[in-house]
Image (spheres, rainbow, N blue to C red):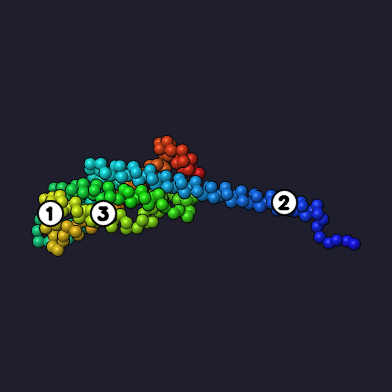
């Protein structure tokens, strides 16, 4: 009687082949996962180093003021009309002193923001690290900023309010007093918005520098992960 179906030898060969194919598939999947994990690690290290460098610069004396990208302009708030503002806030010398003072106060905000950014980088969830690695020079910074939303602004507002009240700076107090219906709390809010932009600009600038010359970091992961493609 003829028995239909594979012989024991054929069945054994098919089983072996199926096992090999499955093994290759698992191996390839594992390699892809490892590759993706490495890419995420590169993004996190890139953001870690970029933010560390940025905050190290911004928290130095005149860190915002001396930065090519992070110097804070006078917030729009100080352009509001007021009875005395027309004279005081139109003086170039007064405006420069006020701007400089706000940039100094911003340093306190950067100290509050630094640990928040560090924690966000550590816990960052990246779904397409390869796209960020192949993106523009500030792609990772942009991604992190979008992930954090208004966290830095909300953290800096009360800090600026506290610092402004404690400092009792005559220039700042005179400027606020010259504006109708404006308080130090309003000034703190306005400065927080400007400082938020400045901080991200500085982090982005540092990311761009690292991408341009990863070898300068002496970090093997960045050197390998950011090599030209």
- Residue contact at pointers 2 and 3, CB within 8 angstroms: no
Name the residue nearer the viewer: 113 or 141: 113
Q: CA distance from mark 3 to mark 1?
A: 19 Å
Where is residue 8 drawn, in percent x and y? 81, 54
Up-down relation of residue 185 to residue 64 (above or below): below
Judged by depth in the image, the label closer to the viewer, 3 or 1, is: 3
- Residue contact at pointers 2 and 1, CB within 8 angstroms: no
Q: Residues within 10 Å of mark 3 (few under 14, many from 20)?
A: many
Q: Earlier in the sequence, mark 3 or mark 1?
A: 3
Could you tell me if residue 92 is visible in this image?
no
Q: Secondary structure at mark 3?
A: helix
Residue displayed at 31% across by 45% down:
55
Residue under numbered circle 1 = 173
Residue under numbered circle 3 = 156
Residue displayed at 50% across by 48% down:
37
Could you tell me if residue 82 is visible in this image?
yes
Name the residue nearer the viewer: 94 or 37: 37
Residue under numbered circle 2 = 17
Name the residue nearer the viewer: 177 or 4: 4
């Amino acid at each position: 009687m003829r028995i239909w179906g594979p012989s024991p030898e054929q069945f054994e060969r098919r089983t072996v082949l199926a096992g090999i194919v499955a093994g290759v598939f698992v191996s390839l999947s594992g390699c892809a996962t490892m590759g993706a994990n490495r890419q995420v690690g590169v993004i996190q290290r890139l953001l870690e180093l970029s933010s560390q460098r940025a905050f190290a610069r911004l928290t130095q004396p005149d860190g915002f003021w001396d930065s090519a990208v992070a110097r804070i302009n006078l917030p729009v708030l100080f352009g509001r009309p007021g009875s005395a503002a027309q004279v005081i806030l139109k003086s170039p010398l007064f405006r420069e002193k006020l701007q400089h003072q706000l940039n100094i106060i911003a340093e306190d905000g950067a100290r509050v923001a630094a640990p928040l950014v560090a924690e966000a980088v550590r816990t960052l969830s990246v779904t397409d690290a390869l796209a960020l690695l192949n993106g523009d020079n500030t792609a990772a910074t942009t991604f992190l900023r979008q992930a954090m939303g208004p966290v830095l602004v909300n953290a800096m507002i009360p800090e600026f309010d506290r610092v402004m009240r404690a400092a009792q700076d005559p220039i700042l107090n005179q400027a606020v007093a010259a504006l109708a219906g404006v308080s130090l709390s309003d000034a703190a809010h306005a400065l927080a918005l400007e400082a938020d932009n400045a901080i991200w600009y500085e982090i982005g600038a540092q990311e761009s520098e690292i991408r341009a010359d990863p070898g300068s970091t002496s970090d093997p992961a960045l050197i390998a992960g950011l090599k030209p493609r």
